[in-house]
Amino acid sequence: MLKKVALSNVNTGRVNQIVVDTDSDDKAISGAGKAANELAKVTNITGLDETIHRLTMKKGNVEDRANLFAGVARCLERNISTIKSFELQSNRVKSPRYRGIIAEVAHQISVGEKISDAMAKFPDAFGPEIVALVKAGEESGRLPEIFAQVGKASKKTLRIIKKLKKGMIYPGIVLTMGVAVIITMSYTLVPAVSKLYGDLGADLPGATLMMMKLSDILIHKPWTLMFPVMGLVMLFKNWGKITKNARVQKIFAATPSLGPIVRKSAAAVSFRCLSLLLESGVRINTALKITSECAPHIYYKEFFGRVRNHVNEGLGLSESFLMESHWLGEDGRTVCGIMEIAAETGSATEMLDEVADDYEEELDNIANQVDKVLEPITILFLGVLVGFLIYAIYSPIFNLGKVMLPGNDDPPPAAAP
């Protein structure tokens, strides 16, 4: 349930409206970050208003998670109570979802629950790897370090995501303009050309007929534009589920330009997760199981699952990596070489951390140049679009002479003897 909290400052009279996604007024006030010199008034957001708010409000993301863990770590390092450490983060996060999570976790801790158990109730925000890390931190007494590590890893992920999004702006604008040009021509130029060609009874190429058919649909049935718009909305809304499909992941991994980004991103997340779990004192068998479950790509799920099976059979980590190195693509031998060093030096955690750092650095470099990577694809799309439009509109013009003056094609009469 969404709740709107009006916080009025008793000194200045200024009122701030904050939305919190929670189930009680007390938790809403806690999640809103009420200060000592503020008065709070809570109202429920229901019905259509709630639906609109949920569609338009900021969603919980990696940025909120990074701010939450980094802030809690800083508070715990200074011996601030766990409940207070969470409540102090209410004004650092930006989404109603995370404000509600903070309030609920603080409440659960206040009634005797462990932090890991409280976080486990929000699997959409805290995956099993994070819950396992927090649980290991509770058992080892290294909770501030664990929170700091998760916050640091989340900030690295956030930085890369922002760069990738920035690189997608130019291709997105080009694609949007291309679609807009086709729609505009379908309403303006194509109808006039269609009338001219129809009156002359000329034979038209398939591209022109296709444009005329599209124009006719958009003019007489404009509501059909809702279908592609709704399709895009559904695509973006279910993008997370679509990208988790094994077949889709395999297609992405095999796609030129996109494949290396997908593989390196999944590798960075997976190896970082395994490194943090082992560093936190989680048993290697359990760490490999959690990493396999949390790996964002099917290839890495298979890789860590098979490595775990080999370890259970008594093989060493480096040997298991070598046996399944083909799942890691062209980087497989390199990673196995690093793990062999780890086996000889007894520094598996450090070497896994180094592997994760290398992948993150490569991904960071790709993110800096993603616009250049996508530029050939964008140019190809523009070339195909412009070529199609020119051929569809202007190709019949060159045949108008034959239609209007059909006698011109007759052979000249023979000369008299």
Image (cartoon, helix red, strand yellow):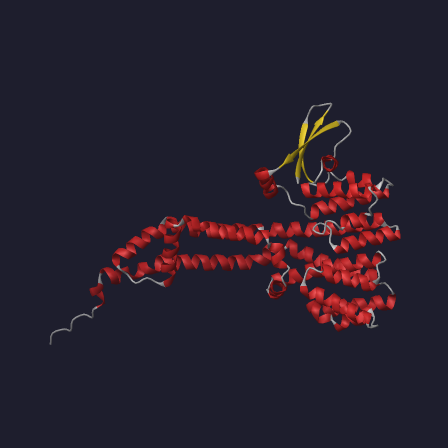
Spot occupied by residue 14 in the image (x, y as percentages of width and height): 68, 26
Report whether residue 148 is seen. no
Tell me the quarter of the picture where residue 26 sits. Answer: top right
Spot occupied by residue 279 in the image (x, y as percentages of width and height): 84, 57
Q: Nearer the viewer, residue 233 or 279?
A: 233
Spot occupied by residue 30 in the image (x, y as percentages of width and height): 75, 36
* Horizontal relation, residue 266 to residue 211: left or right: right
Report whether residue 322 is seen. yes
Q: Quadrant of the N terminus?
A: top right
* Horizontal relation, residue 416 to residue 284: left or right: left
Q: Nearer the viewer, residue 157 or 290?
A: 290
User: What residue is at 71 percent from the left and 45 percent from the top?
Assistant: 64
Q: Would you place residue 129 above or below residue 112 in this image?
A: below
- Count of numbered circles in the view: 0
Given the current orientation, which residue lies at the most extreme bottom position? 417
User: What residue is at 84 percent from the left and 49 percent from the top?
Assistant: 143
Q: Quadrant of the C terminus?
A: bottom left
Tell me the quarter of the picture where residue 371 sits. Answer: bottom right
* Horizontal relation, residue 193 to residue 345: left or right: left
Spot occupied by residue 119 in the image (x, y as percentages of width and height): 76, 48
Q: Nearer the viewer, residue 103 or 255?
A: 103
Given the current orientation, which residue lies at the most extreme left position? 417
Q: Nearer the viewer, residue 331 or 67?
A: 67
